[in-house]
Amino acid sequence: MSGRNDGQAEGQGRVYQASGDQHITEHHHHDRSGRGLSDGSPSSRGPDSVRHPAVGRAPATLRDRDELMLRLRSAVAHDAAGEVLVLHGLGGCGKTAVAHTLFRHAANEADRLGLWVNASDHASLRAGMLAVAADRGAGDGELMAARNGLRAAADLVWDRLDASDRPWLLVFDNADDPAVLRDGGWLRTSPRGTVLVTTRQSATHWWPAAELLHVGVLPRDDAAQVLCDLAPGTGTAEEARTVADRLGRLPLALTLAGGFLAHQVIEPWTMSEYGRRLEDRQDPTELIDRGAGAIGDDSRHLVSGTWQLSLNALVRQGMPDATPLLRLLACWSGDPLPISLLAGVELGPELPAARVEPALRGLLDHSLTELVSSGDPRCLRTHGVLLDSVARGTPDDRRDPLVATAAGLLVAALPEAPERGVRDPLLSLLSPHVLALLRRVRDWSAVRESTAEAAAECALRLVTGQHRSGEYASALAVATEAVELLERRLGEEHVLVLRLRQRVGKSVDRLGHLEDAVERHRRVLADLERVCGPDAPDTLTSCLQLSRPLTWTGRTAEAVALMHRTVTGRSARLGPWHPLTLEARTCLLELPPGAELEEEAGAGPELVAACLRELGPHHPTTLAAELNCAHALFNTGRPIEALPMARSALTAHERRYGIDYPITLAARSLLSAVLAALGESAEAIQQIEKVIEGRERVLGPAHQWTLAARKKLDSYREQQSGLPGGSQ
């Protein structure tokens, strides 16, 4: 054969050139990454040491792990052996720091040999475990045979560990893929030592006969102290608590933030400034990750990178649909999320309904979300910084369908017409998720206007439910923030924004800030008249809402004109017996004593009869008509006629709404006034004392309605003391 042959070798390959016939047999033993293990490469040589933890910056003080450390220290106490303990939790929650602390305790105080192995991949695990065998006395021939596949490597290691002359603690760090430990039988127990595993994988089937110990985020004060430890002098304890809350009290994020604050030279930031910078960002992870230089910059030391490792693992395990489910969760908040909300999830081909359950199971198993251990309904909790990071990485073309799905699920869970007086615990749970969805709408320009309107409808239903359940402060807070967020996206004059502004005014009114309520209602009424027209349903609703604080601040004539405008407009559009028309007519009976009330009071009994006929005895408008009619009879000097109606109204409100609902308390207050007017001072005092107790529970002792009830009590006592036979 003549001519010239050229060859090139890559990796572990070699090129042979010869003349004549040659028969060459060559054996290569590779790890899962394709690298040879018998060539003197770093993978085959093993780690530089298994006696020292291969970690970055270890914490000088471990915060708030006292109960966990007590259990772990018992596992390395004298004669303790044969246990496998698994530390599991979200990436960045400090599992390695806990393991490192136990490792130091075992070596320095428990007279144990500490052995540390990186179990993140097959090559590192195999090299580390063979280094453990060498440490425990395995000879070169035994190690060579194990490396070349002539002897079971795991058997060699565990034979040596079983025969160790000293008790030991063996740490398998970063075992996020448990198959790495299972393949080859690397995870075992021994009478000579204790095994500790750190992992994100919480599924119990991976850890038979092991004790699973969860590592979560830190309590608020301990999280703040981590910042103060790392960056002393940059802020107060309260400022540290605020920053810790924004970081979700995740140890990795706290460490990165503290490192960043401590290592700035030219223009050092305070904690307060750092907190403001976090708030200014849609996704705070970029700022958090800037602190990685202080502790090493591999992906496990980056908030953004540490979670991507888990998502990549899920994709490798055949669960790519876990990513769209996590993106959906990122439309909501890191607060507990009712699992029932996910029952109707459907994201098309990327996440069919049939795949939601296994996708969620994957997120749970990899600690990317967790089940809240107690409470009803059952909830999930996903770390807020993780959600912000996932949201930032969501492609633009996926954002609108995700928000539309999230809004649709919330709308389905929120009542369209919530009952008055019914305290639905679901409203409190869903409140942070509605606001988080509105923030995504504000920040994601790819979200269409129709989708933003669906999110606004969620906010409107939530606020209406809160208001009707008597939670006026919560309704005010949510409505105010919702208006601010939606104005940036839908504009100040969008009808849904205007309806939320109406809800702000109603809550301000119910909280007793009447002048503020008047001004708010005036502005929204003017905007509705301009945008929707003077006779539009929303405009007429604002007329009625403005009339109430006007009545209570003494501007009765203006209030009556607005009420009549509403009655006329609704009668023309809806008919005289429509519930909304009847509602407007009942408001006319709530006027204070005066000529206007004298004119309206005579129609009270007729109105009550009409409500009973058209709506039934249990309709909210019927109850309001009966109460307001009793109010009108009393204020026009007919307490004897008012008394049976006032008693009936109180009984009906208690039955329908409960004893502490604000309108029930108003009904009881009216009954006490009627009784006092009829000289029944003892019962009047008894009723007003119940009003005071209820208002103190609901509104607090300093609220003006509570103070007004106390004034009534004082006047009734004075009246009682002036009666014949009364105490002087």
Image: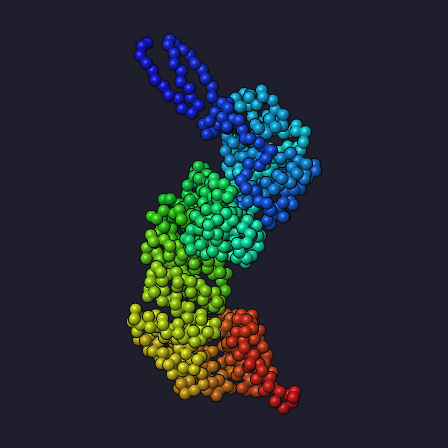
The quarter of the image holding the C terminus is bottom right
Residue 373: percent from left, percent from top: 55, 51
Task: Kindly indicate the quadrant of the structure image that contains residue 97.
Answer: top right
Residue 128 visible, this angle: no
Q: Is residue 31 above or below residue 327?
A: above
Residue 511 visible, this angle: yes
Nearer-the-camera pick, 6 or 36 = 6
Nearer-the-camera pick, 74 or 597 = 74
Residue 107: percent from left, percent from top: 65, 37
Looking at the image, how many numbered discs can be counted on the residues?
A: 0
**Which residue sits at x=57%, y=36%?**
53
Report whether 510 appears left or right of 155: left
| Residue farthest right in this picture | 78
Nearer-the-camera pick, 377 or 650 = 377
| Residue farthest bottom in this picture | 724
Report whether 88 appears left or right of 517: right
Q: Is residue 336 above or below residue 717?
A: above
Report whether 51 appears left or right of 459: right
The quarter of the image holding the N terminus is top left
